[in-house]
Image (tube, helix red, strand yellow):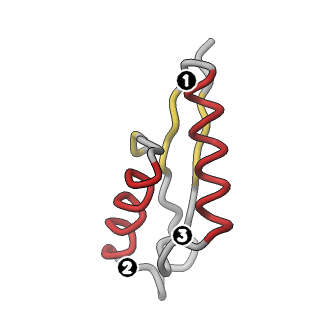
Amino acid sequence: MTVRTRFSPSPTGMIHLGNARAALYSALYAKKNQGIFILRIEDTDAERSEERYVAALQDDLNWLGAQCGQY
């Protein structure tokens, strides 16, 4: 069985320290167990969600070294 972890932010703003910590822990756990780390964008706040924040989240996660697939 493959380990699969995820980070599921709502793209309503820039990443903050709590988001980065949660994403990094999930990514490191997946890496340690030869698993998959998935970025799953939630659409729970459609009024404030913006596509530019999705791109910024991906850039920030890559900068942190948390390579991910998108689900």
Specify the quadrant of the image occupied by residue 31: top right
Q: Residue furthest bottom?
A: 47
Q: Identify residue for label 3.
A: 10
Q: Earlier in the sequence, mark 1 or mark 3?
A: 3
Q: Horizontal and vertical percent for residue 27?
A: 57, 40
Describe the element under mark 2 as helix, strand or loop: loop
Does the residue at mark 1 contact the one at mark 2 (Cβ under 8 Å)?
A: no
Q: Amino acid at mark 2?
A: Glu
Residue at image position (61%, 37%) is: 5
Q: Identify residue for label 1.
A: 35
Residue mark closest to the camera, 1 vs 3? 1
> Residue 35 versus residue 47: which sits nearer the camera?
35
Q: Residues within 10 Å of mark 1 (few under 14, many from 20)?
A: some
User: In which quadrant is the N terminus drawn?
Assistant: top right
Q: Amino acid at mark 1?
A: Gly
Q: Is residue 40 left or right of residue 25?
A: left
Work out how far the residue at label 1 is from the one at label 2, CA to CA, in angstroms.
29 Å
Residue at image position (44%, 79%) is: 49
Q: Horizontal and vertical percent for residue 37?
A: 52, 37
Describe the element under mark 3 as helix, strand or loop: loop
Q: Is residue 29 above or below residue 48?
A: above
Q: Amino acid at mark 3?
A: Ser
Residue at image position (66%, 44%) is: 25
Q: Identify residue for label 2.
A: 50
Q: Earlier in the sequence, mark 1 or mark 2?
A: 1
Q: Is residue 14 above or below residue 66?
A: below
Q: Earlier in the sequence, mark 2 or mark 3?
A: 3
Which disc, if any, is residue 1?
none
Does the residue at mark 1 contact the one at mark 3 (Cβ under 8 Å)?
A: no
Work out how far the residue at label 1 is from the one at label 3, CA to CA, in angstroms.
23 Å
Describe the element under mark 1 as helix, strand or loop: loop
User: In which quadrant is the C terminus drawn?
Assistant: top left
